[in-house]
Image (tube, coloured by chain):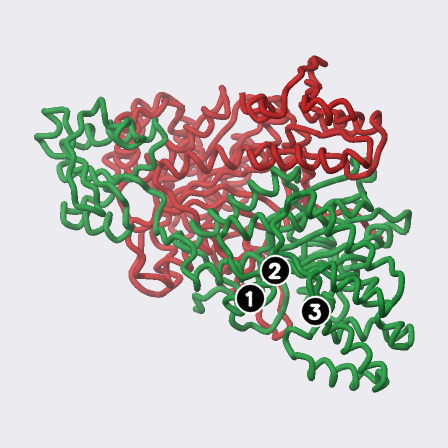
Chain colours: A green, B red
Amino acid sequence: MNLQPPKGMRDFLPKDMIKRESIISLIKQIFEKYGFDPFETPMVEYAETLEGKYGEDEKLIYKFKDKAGRNLALRYDLTVPLSRVIASNKELPKPFKRYQISRAWRYDNVQKGRYREIWQCDIDTVGSKSLLCEAELISAFIEILENLKFKKYSININNRKILDSIARYANVENKKIKDVFVSIDKFDKIGLQGVKKELESRKIKTDSVKKILSIITLADKPELLLNKLEKILGENEGINELREIISYLKQLKTKPKYAVNLTLARGLDYYTGPIFEVYVEEPKVGSLGGGGRYDNLIGNLSSSDNIPAVGFSLGLDRLIDVLNELKMIENKKTLTQVFISNVSEKNLKYTLSIVNLLRENNIKTQFDLMSKNLKKQLTFANSLEIPYVIIIGDDEVSSKKLKVKDMNSGKESNVTVNNLVKFFQK
Amino acid sequence: MNLQPPKGMRDFLPKDMIKRESIISLIKQIFEKYGFDPFETPMVEYAETLEGKYGEDEKLIYKFKDKAGRNLALRYDLTVPLSRVIASNKELPKPFKRYQISRAWRYDNVQKGRYREIWQCDIDTVGSKSLLCEAELISAFIEILENLKFKKYSININNRKILDSIARYANVENKKIKDVFVSIDKFDKIGLQGVKKELESRKIKTDSVKKILSIITLADKPELLLNKLEKILGENEGINELREIISYLKQLKTKPKYAVNLTLARGLDYYTGPIFEVYVEEPKVGSLGGGGRYDNLIGNLSSSDNIPAVGFSLGLDRLIDVLNELKMIENKKTLTQVFISNVSEKNLKYTLSIVNLLRENNIKTQFDLMSKNLKKQLTFANSLEIPYVIIIGDDEVSSKKLKVKDMNSGKESNVTVNNLVKFFQK
């Protein structure tokens, strides 16, 4: 029998999961102080809910039927299910700010850093058109990256409205504008020449291609770049929106790790305004996630009034891959703080009383469950790198004193039972 | 378009998810102090991994093919995937103690308290035959139920070996012993007469049925019941195992909320020894979860040496249903502690500086994102039951003093900016 998880999906042993949990807990804390609340949806959706939302990537959705013939699908992201919930719970007070750290599935090519079961960390603000929402999302993400001690990274910002204006300025026909977005979206992977070829293969006129490429490769500090762009495109809603976001970021005292990047397009069909991505420059891992404004998605789902929304999503898997590569995250094989070693059946009762005492005081404790000899018990504690071991023998039982061994330094301390809890809480 | 989640699956709005997270956090804390570490597997497995493990309930597994024709399935429980991981990572130090709070899917009849997407809280100890493992699992679960303030509940304990002996004592043929387990397992749902009919319909002889029923309905305090049973069955491994577990529970000073219940059988195919369940008597909700020893499952998966294991699983969904029904859990619509109200564009910068100050000090803060008027901002804060509101107007900006309104009592406090953080940390 094949004992592996399905291709592109992974098991997480405690050493992996302890890291994952510590990152998730840091991210949650930041999401919550920004006023986002926890939220969940099923991992499974009706297939029709997901269809027509993801552009070319729709083919990556896992679809299946249940025993009653219902067309179901594993969710592809967290945004479309959120939109469904908003559309079906119109009474929710707005703005509705939620976070969600959960999984999605994409039948993608499996390669380094790309998996078929992915974990995402999302925040979305629903119900407000204010660009303060964008600023808040960007600010929260920069705070996360700073807390994780990233140095060389940037939140790249662009606007679908600007890309639209660039395409129009370059005389691209209306029906081909989406093609332009899809091509530009590949800039990071295939480079300038690649995008050029891609645009040409999509039958965009040579003159248009030239104009598009000359504009999207402009680079400068955010305000200066927007000024340059305005000189080319004229007064422009997209440009003004980015100016407003940047002004809010300054007022929020957000660390200036953001940049306007005109090559950013984002693949998803549903974005309508500002878009952004987390881009890590060192090591050269590229995008760790992204987001943007999607003012029409919820309205389209429910065929009623639009409800504006904007979201930002961080991919947990690549994030953790990077943190591992850069050794930016502690390795830990267990959360257990103390192992109680006992080699004599007759001292079991005393051993368990010490176990109880520690656990009652919330100290994470294991004890021998396999009647191993002392040496094997110590080998076990060592293999898990449990920081402290207490060895219980006849002397310890009669004296009510315990030897606590620090497994890192090898140092032994004599601690009375009365002082034991204090010893570990120090 | 259908805006509902698939049948039997549910969305969790912040008011639901805040409860869920608070229960999960309590359970995690207890699992961790008992020395269990976090662990995860994919939500999707190869179908063959799950086949032949769940007895009659195997038909409830969601199966499907991916685009390459692989036979996949949504996981049905957390135990079989754990066993797969153990079988494929033989080098893991033993005992291997892991917890997992995650989802599984069962194509079950949807009814009150029964869902198709279920959340489970599992602990398993792998690699040890010691009955100390059983005692630890039971002890951890009693601690959880005590922490949740349950009053009328019991951890029911039985042993597959005892049920086996009872069936043999009643002269049931070997090949029908599994039928006896399946019938007894329904005792709680269909009662004594129901089990009688069920056994008869499975062609168990009348005399055998009579003997079985007269034994399994014996009831008394654990030790006394086991003594009675021993008088009938004679010296018995299953009885001695339960005696040993009870002796460990006493040494662990576990609150005596456990009982030996001979009608407990547990449906799953893979149990080999002691079995247990969480049974809540008031309100009459019945089983909230269960578990047992499965010493052969891992060996069967890998066609190699057996690795003993024992686990206990709590169903989070029914647990939370019960806590809600009994009003044993706080209702909260948001985690946000403070809402900052601002009605004038020109005071935005000052408003954001206060927002920053609070968030920097880890106080969960929202502010107006929709340019609402003051009344509507207060209505919003009220609708989410945010406990404090700070209103920022021209006076507040010039005086560097803030009015903090306690939304429960209506009381207003004047707080200087310098004292603001302290005010909320008090």
Residue at x 76% of width, y 36% of height? B348
Q: Earlier in the sequence, mark 2 or mark 3?
A: 2
User: Could you say where residue A148 lies in the image, as x and y percent from the top left?
Assistant: 50, 51
Q: State how far apart marks 1 and 2 are (Cα).
A: 8 Å
Residue at x 35% of width, y 21% of height? B221
Is the residue A172 above or below the residue B363 in the image? below
Instruction: Inspect this view and state whether residue A76 appears.
Output: no
Q: Chain of mark 3?
A: A
Is the residue A13 above or below the residue A370 in the image? below
Give yes or no for contact between labels 1 and 2 (Cβ–Cβ under 8 Å): yes
User: Could you say where residue A68 lies in the image, as x and y percent from the top left?
Assistant: 72, 56
Q: Which residue is mark 2?
A: A154
State the SS at label 2: strand
Residue A219 is labelled as 3
How many numbered marks, from 0 up? 3
Disc 2 crowd, CA 10 A, few/some/many (<14, 14-19, 20+): many
Residue at x 54% of width, y 30% of height? B286
Report the quarter where the C terminus of chain B lies: top right
Q: Quadrant of residue B381?
A: top right
Residue type at mark 1 is: Glu
Q: Chain of mark 2?
A: A
Residue B264 in the figure: left or right of residue A152: left
Q: Quadrant of residue A136?
A: top right
Q: Nearer the viewer, residue B249 or A135?
A: A135
